Image (tube, rainbow, N blue to C red):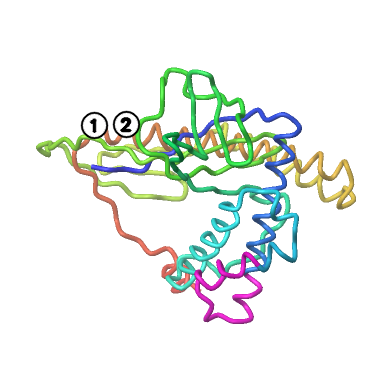
Amino acid sequence: MLINRAYKFRMYPNEKEQEIINKTIGCSRFVYNYMLSLKKKNSTLSTYDLIKEIPNLVKNNTFLKEVDSCSLRCAIFDLDNGFKKYYQRECGYPKYKKKGVKDCYRTNYIKSEYKGTTYENIKVDLQKGVIKLPKIKEIKIRGYRKLEKIKGRIINATIEHIANKYYVSVCVEEEIKEEVKVSQNAVGIDLGVKSLVVTSDGEYYGNPDYLKKYEKKIKGLQKGLSRKEKGSKNYYKIKNKIQEVYRKLQNARRKMNEEIVSKIIKNNDIIVTEDLSINKMLKEAN
C-alpha cells in the first residue's frame, strides 16, 4: 500500500540563502494574488488558463526570473485547491495572501537525465545533514537523527519562514506492508469541547494546563502589539514573538494529539466515531 508521509526539518540557511528563500516566498505570494484577481474578474478561467499567463507575467515583472519557476506554478495549484474547497463548501472564498502570514512556498520534485547523469532538483542527504533545493545548492538541516535516509519517492517540498526560523517539509510517497488483523477490541470516541476526546470506555482526554499557558502568553503579547505603531521595529519584534509562541503551541497540540491517537490505536482494533458536519450544525444553530 502506498502512503504519503511528510518529514519536517529545521533549516539553517546563510544570509544569501535566506535572501533567495524570502524572494521566492514573496514571488509566490505575488503570483497567487495576481491570479486571484484574474479569477475574480473572470471566474471561468481554468488552472491551465492561469498557467499560460505566467510567461507574460514574468516578462512584465523580471524579478520573477530570479526564483524557482516551479514554485510559481505551485502557487496557482494552491489557488485552484482553494477554489475547489470553496465550491465543495469546505471553506470560504480564497483571500489575498499577506506578508508575514503563513510565509511559505511549495516546489515539486523533478528528475531528469542528461548524457548519463541524473539530475534532481530536491535531494535530502541525512548523512551530511543537508537538503538541496531549486536555485539553492545545499542548506544545513536538522531532524530525524536516528534515520539514515528517507525511503520512497519525493513528491514535493514546502519551505516555511516562521518567526525568523526556516523549516522544510518533504512529502514522500512510501510503500508499507498492510497487515491483516482479526478485530477483537472496539471503542467509540466522541469529540467534545470541555474534554477533547471521550471514549466509550469512560476515558477522558482533556486539554493539558500547559496549553493554557501558551494561550495566556499569546493574549498578553497581542495586547502589547495593539499598543505599538504598525510597521515599526517594535511592532515586528512582538509579532515575531507571537509567531514563535504559536509555533510552540502548535507543536504541543500536535504532540498531545499523537499521544492520544497512539494510545487509542494501540489498545483497540476497531475505532468508531460519529460523522458530524460542523458547518451544518452551525447553520442550524443560527
Q: Which residue is mark 2?
A: 263
Q: What is the magenta range?
A: 36-55
| Residue 42 on the magenta span | yes
Residue at mark 1 to residue at mark 2: CA–CA distance: 6 Å
Secondary structure of the residue carrying tag 2 is helix
Q: Is residue 222 above or below residue 127?
A: below
Q: How many marks?
A: 2
Q: Amino acid at mark 2?
A: Lys
Residues packed near mark 1 inside 10 Å, few (<14), some (14 to 19) or many (20 plus): few
Q: Is residue 80 magenta?
A: no
Label 1, secondary structure: give it: helix
Q: Amino acid at mark 1?
A: Asn
Residue 266, horizontal then vertical, whole percent:
26, 31
Where residue 257 sits, quadrant-wise, is top left
> Percent from the top left, x then y, of residue 12?
65, 28
Q: Does residue 42 appear to the left or right of 48 in the view shown?
A: right
Residue nearer the viewer, 195 or 21: 21
Residue annotated with mark 1: 267
Q: Residue at x 51, y 34 (%)?
A: 8
**Residue 146's x, y, as percent?**
43, 17
Q: Please state which of residues 105 and 234 is positioned toward the viewer in this rendering.
A: 105
